[in-house]
């Protein structure tokens, strides 16, 4: 319980102008909403429940609620994401002077152009943290904490790999040697896994997305176009600064491999499709689909815009291996049926998230 002053009690007890002295002789007094005040033997007054509409909530309650918004699982996965991304960048991309995308690529370039004392991990912190803090208002406190945690893990892991662990990454990849294509491909895939996990579990590996959210609209650009323009400009600057276009061109392979991997990780491991079927034989098709695939369907009543004819729409989600069979089954029952099949990003069922593409 939390101590109340006389002034608190005067305001909170009834809210009708009654004074504290009205209840001095009682041990417990009711507050609005069945909340109660307790008088202790030392003469202090305590309340057990809190009415936030009457006076400000205690700081410790606000802090407790804020902490409750974070998930230990998310922090664990973000820890793994930062380590994985550092492995991809420091063991494959940076040793052969390839470039990652976004702020990570900018950090690699700056680490190559500056004295050795200014390492990759230093620029990752210096460039990313301010952008993530700028995004606090737009993205919220939880995202900012998750993202800053991820970047700190990433930069710390990069520092450990390059400066502490007995691994030589100065002139070649310890796993792929000097093969630029292998380094670009596997570096992109591995760093993409890290970035994808960061996004999937509420954080971010790179501040460029936050910068895009902040600056894209004033520039009249979409977030995607802002990131694309930034990366194209980055690779052009890298080519000019290093007086070579081979490395920036191979870096595009890294970017492409990383982007596809991020999509794969964020959208899910299972590739599912949603089918909308407009048919005059809804009962027959629904029965057959349910028996064949062991899945449920949603039946929607619809009406043709021009004809005004009542129609029935069946909505069903199947995996990618079942789409061809679904088409064949529907056409065998209703050759005039109309089908629209689209990718599904995430399936939420019974409060459990099932990943899908």
Image: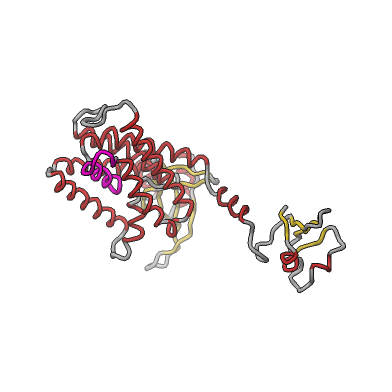
As rendered, which of 245 and 149 lies closer to the eye? 149
As rendered, which of 249 and 3 lies closer to the eye? 3
Question: Can residue 217 be seen here?
Answer: yes
Counting from the top left corner in percent of width and height, residue 123 is at 31, 45
Counting from the top left corner in percent of width and height, residue 186 is at 27, 34
**In this figure, which colouring scheme has been used for the structure?**
secondary structure
Locate the C terminus by quadrant.
top left
Q: Is residue 260 left or right of residue 355?
A: left
> Which residue is located at x 25 percent, y 38 percent?
116
SS assignment for the magenta stretch, majority: helix
Question: Can residue 338 be seen here?
Answer: no
As rendered, which of 177 and 19 lies closer to the eye? 19
Instruction: Give the quarter of the image for residue 54.
Output: bottom right
Q: Is residue 113 magenta?
A: yes
Q: Is residue 109 magenta?
A: yes
> Which residue is located at x 71 percent, y 54 percent?
2
Tell me if residue 182 comes above or below residue 257 in the rendering.
above
Tell me if residue 282 comes above or below residue 97 in the rendering.
below
Instruction: Give the quarter of the image for residue 278.
Output: bottom left
Residue placed furthest toward the right: 25
Tell me if residue 156 comes above or below residue 57 in the rendering.
above
Q: Is residue 44 left or right of residue 215?
A: right
As rendered, which of 221 and 69 lies closer to the eye? 69
Tell me if residue 306 comes above or below residue 226 in the rendering.
below
Q: How many marks?
A: 0
> Which residue is located at x 81 percent, y 54 percent?
42
The magenta-colored residue range is 100-118
> Which residue is located at x 24 percent, y 55 percent?
229
């Amino acid at each position: 319980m939390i101590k109340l002053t006389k002034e608190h009690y005067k305001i909170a007890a009834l809210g009708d102008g009654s004074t504290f002295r009205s209840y001095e002789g009682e041990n417990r007094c009711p507050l609005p909403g069945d909340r109660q005040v307790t008088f202790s033997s030392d003469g202090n007054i305590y309340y057990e429940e809190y009415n936030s509409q009457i006076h400000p909530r205690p700081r410790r309650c606000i802090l407790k609620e804020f902490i409750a918004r974070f998930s230990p699982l998310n922090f664990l996965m973000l820890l793994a994401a930062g380590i994985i991304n550092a492995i991809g960048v420091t063991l494959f991309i940076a040793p052969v002077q390839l470039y990652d995308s976004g702020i990570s690529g900018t950090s690699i370039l700056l680490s190559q152009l500056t004295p050795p004392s200014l390492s990759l991990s230093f620029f990752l912190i210096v460039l990313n943290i301010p952008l993530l803090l700028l995004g606090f208002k737009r993205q919220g406190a939880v995202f900012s904490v998750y993202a800053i945690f991820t970047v700190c893990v990433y930069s710390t892991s990069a520092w450990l790999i390059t400066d502490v662990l007995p691994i030589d990454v100065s002139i070649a990849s310890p796993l792929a040697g000097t093969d630029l294509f292998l380094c670009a491909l596997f570096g992109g895939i591995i760093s993409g896994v890290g970035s994808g996990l960061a996004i999937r579990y509420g954080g971010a590996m790179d501040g460029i997305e936050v910068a895009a959210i902040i600056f894209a609209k004033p520039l009249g650009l979409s977030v995607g176009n802002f990131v694309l323009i930034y990366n194209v400009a980055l690779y052009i600057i890298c080519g000019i600064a290093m007086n070579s276009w081979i490395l920036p061109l191979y870096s595009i392979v890294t970017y492409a491999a990383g982007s596809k991997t991020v999509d794969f990780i964020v959208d899910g491991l299972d590739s599912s499709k949603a089918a909308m079927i407009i048919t005059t034989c809804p009962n027959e098709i629904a029965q057959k689909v349910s028996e064949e695939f062991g899945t449920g369907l949603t039946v929607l009543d619809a009406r043709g815009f021009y004809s005004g004819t009542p129609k029935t729409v069946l909505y069903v989600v199947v995996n990618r291996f079942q789409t061809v069979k679904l088409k064949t089954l529907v056409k065998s029952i209703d050759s005039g049926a109309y089908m629209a099949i689209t990718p599904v990003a995430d399936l939420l069922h019974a409060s459990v998230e099932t990943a899908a593409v």
